Amino acid sequence: MQTNLQPAEIVAVIACGIYFMMGLLTGIWKYFSIMKSPTHQTHIYIDIAHRAALMYAFACLVLKEFARLSTLSETIEILAVLIPILFFGSAIVTYIILGITKHTENQFKHRNLITTYGMYLLIIGEVGGFAVLMYSAFRNLLS
């Protein structure tokens, strides 16, 4: 089947599908967790994993649309889409692990390499990747 999508758009659509499915599956996990709980509440990180997966699925569609409007090189567009997507995925997986292990403290309570420098990389990667796409899309739309 032929598609008119560019490689960066394809990456975004695939990630969207994966993250949306993760959102649906963590929703099932959340439901069963609620039903088994005497307080009818799920563990906070199960809830966060569910919501984050759904949110990031739709964020991937935003990246896809901005990649479509971008006039940058294919390589730059793929990187600008892929970097935020990888950080989205790492966040979801982290929340799932924290939910499985029933982590009871805020993950940032104890500072370490990941909670300090990892967050700076996440900020740069997510904001930077989108900023590149947004700049190119706006430049294209306003020219």
Image (cartoon, rainbow, N blue to C red):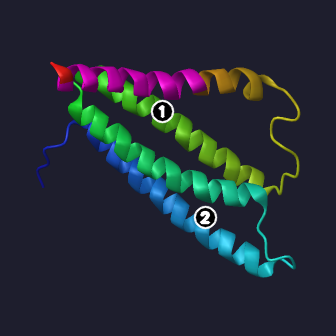
Q: Which residue is mark 1?
A: 84
Q: Is residue 135 visible?
A: yes
Element at badge 1?
Answer: helix
Asked if the stretch drawn in magenta spans residue 9, the answer is: no
Q: Position of residue 134 (x, y in %)?
A: 34, 26
Examine the rendered structure and indicate whether residue 126 appears above or below residue 124. below
What whole-number distance in Å separates the C-alpha atoms at marks 2 and 1?
21 Å
- The residue at 61%/59% (across/down) is 50
Q: Residue at x 40, y 44 (%)?
A: 60
**Which dot marks residue 26?**
2
Q: Position of residue 49 (x, y in %)?
A: 64, 54
Tell which of 114 and 57 is nearer to you: 57
Q: Is residue 15 left or right of residue 1?
A: right
**Residue 126: image location, x then y, percent:** 51, 29
Q: Is residue 131 magenta?
A: yes
Stretch in magenta? 123-141
Q: Amino acid at mark 1?
A: Pro
For residue 71, say whether it is visible. Answer: no
- Please tell me which residue is depicted at 46% across the width and 58% down the height of the picture: 20
- Percent position of residue 46, x then y: 71, 60
